[in-house]
Amino acid sequence: MPTLKDLVGRAMHGSALAVTQLHAMMPAMIHERFFEANYINPAPNSANTRIVSVTVPHGLLGVLEGILVLTATRVDFDSLVFQVRVNGAPILGYDSLQGPMGDTITGPYPVFVPLNSQSVVDVVVRNPTLGSFVFATGALLGRFFPDTLPHELHALAATRGGG
């Protein structure tokens, strides 16, 4: 696990991942939180259909912190296949979900996925069956922040001689 000083040094040398890690370690420095949710009724025998999507604003970085995929009833999970994608590519481990992730009581399933500026994160679902009365819910939780070293860490960066 990198130390705070190591991350500051990497951030000073332009590492977007280090900046993301620093902001994640200091949750008080949030620029904007997001929680987007939606539900759809995917057509039978359908290809991937977007349920919900979030785009990181230009000039900001982000982190996806939670995923929620649900159906109206447990039986519907046999009919649906979910994916969570970044820029159209499935996230490994979240590429073929056939069960709930998170719930309405405890909230979204916790994850940590760093996001670059203008990344598009979406939850998609396909209905490979002939069933037409299924409902799919998807939600994404996270935050955006400036693509800069957190202000509170500039003093620490100065003690490292700028990196």
Image (spheres, grey):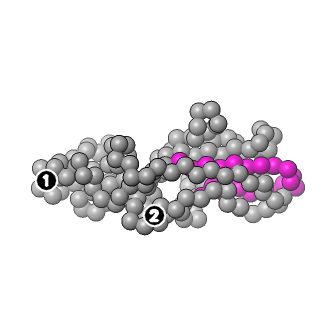
The residue lying furthest to the front in this view is 32
Helix, strand or loop at label 1? It is helix
Name the kind of residue labelled 1 in the image: Ala
Residue annotated with mark 1: 158
Q: Residue 144, image x and y in percent?
A: 43, 54
Give the farthest residue toward the top: 105
Q: Nearer the viewer, residue 113 or 68?
A: 68
* Three-letter amino acid code of the residue under disc 2: Pro
Res 69 label: none
Residue assigned mark 2: 57
Horizontal side of residue 76 vs 113, given as left or right: right
Give the magenta part as a residue range. Answer: 122-141
Secondary element at tag 2:
loop
Q: Let me know if residue 3 is in the magenta part.
A: no
Q: Residue 11, located in which quarter of the rendered image?
A: bottom left
The vertical placement of 53 against 77, above or below, is below
Quadrant placement of the N terminus = top left
Please tell me whether residue 126 belongs to the stretch shown in magenta.
Answer: yes
Q: Identify the residue shown where x is 69% and y is 48%.
A: 137
Relative to 31, say whether 57 is above or below.
below
- Local crowd at mark 2 within 10 Å, few (<14), some, or many (≥20)? some
In this view, 13 is above or below 104: below
Q: Position of residue 42 (x, y in %)?
A: 78, 57
